[in-house]
Image: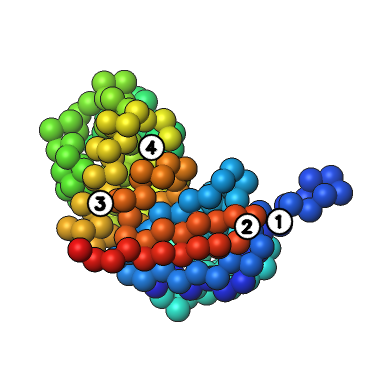
Amino acid sequence: MIIVKNLKRYYKTGEVTVKALNGVFLEVKEKEFIAIIGPSGSGKTTLLRILGLIDKPTKGDYTINNLNVVDLPEEERTYYRLTQLGYVFQDYALINEMSASENVLILSLMEGKSKEKSLLTAKNALEKVGLGNMMDRVPGQLSGGEKQRVAIARAIAKKPKILFADEPCANLDTRTSKQVLEVLKELNKKYGQTIVMVTHEDWHLKYASRVIKLKDGKIVSDMRKRKT
């Protein structure tokens, strides 16, 4: 599904070159649930942003289902990201004036789909994350965990090939984090959704089927869990 070879991302800070990623080799198979961990500054979020087509690498190869996404023109990259990939941010990124269903269906409307079809898509996505009875609530009427589940519903509504989650529990307490992680686990196990998640909490790793550790912009360990 995903193949990354010798991925590098360098930043210039004055005369200093920061090597956020310094030669990453990675393969992600369909239906995997991968957790990426590592200390601050290890390159976790940089890697996720590149995989999610939000950022571009300085060097290296990146293909999804044999499509070279690095060299896509910007317009095609944007279209591919919006239609084929899902991205969950740690701060929810919801529109406060819109209901849960409106926050989810807005992307479908932007793609030119009818309001009726978009609403059905939103309803199905919200039901998958356990919020089918909260479609009309605005973010101010939702808890932190419910807001994040709306964000997840928005990301999966278009049935993306891969769901990227950038520390989705960073702003949540332990109990609420467990609820969100259970949703991600169910999406992976029940619906076969491929998930790549960045986290800084060791206890989150039990929800993933594979754990990748980064340090100084490189993968230092890659462990697949045994099926039980």
Amino acid, disc 3: Lys
Residue named by callout 2: 217
**Image location of residue 141, percent across then percent down:** 26, 21
Circle 2 residues within 10 Å: few <14, some 14–19, many ≥20: many
Q: Nearer the viewer, residue 160 or 106?
A: 160
Residue extending furthest bottom? 66
Residue extending furthest right? 15
Kind of element beneath mark 2: loop
**Image location of residue 148, percent across then percent down:** 33, 36
Q: Nearer the viewer, residue 188 or 219?
A: 219
Q: Earlier in the sequence, mark 4 or mark 3?
A: 4
Kind of element beneath mark 1: strand
- Are the residues tagged 4 and 2 within 8 Å (C-beta)? no
Answer above or below: position of 177 versus 18.
Answer: above
Residue named by callout 3: 185
Residue extending furthest left? 133
Amino acid, disc 2: Gly
- Are the residues tagged 1 and 3 within 8 Å (C-beta)? no
Figure quadrant of the N terminus: bottom left
Q: Residue at x 34, y 28 (%)?
A: 173
Disc sitting over residue 169 in the figure: 4
Disc sitting over residue 19 in the figure: 1
Circle 1 residues within 10 Å: few <14, some 14–19, many ≥20: some
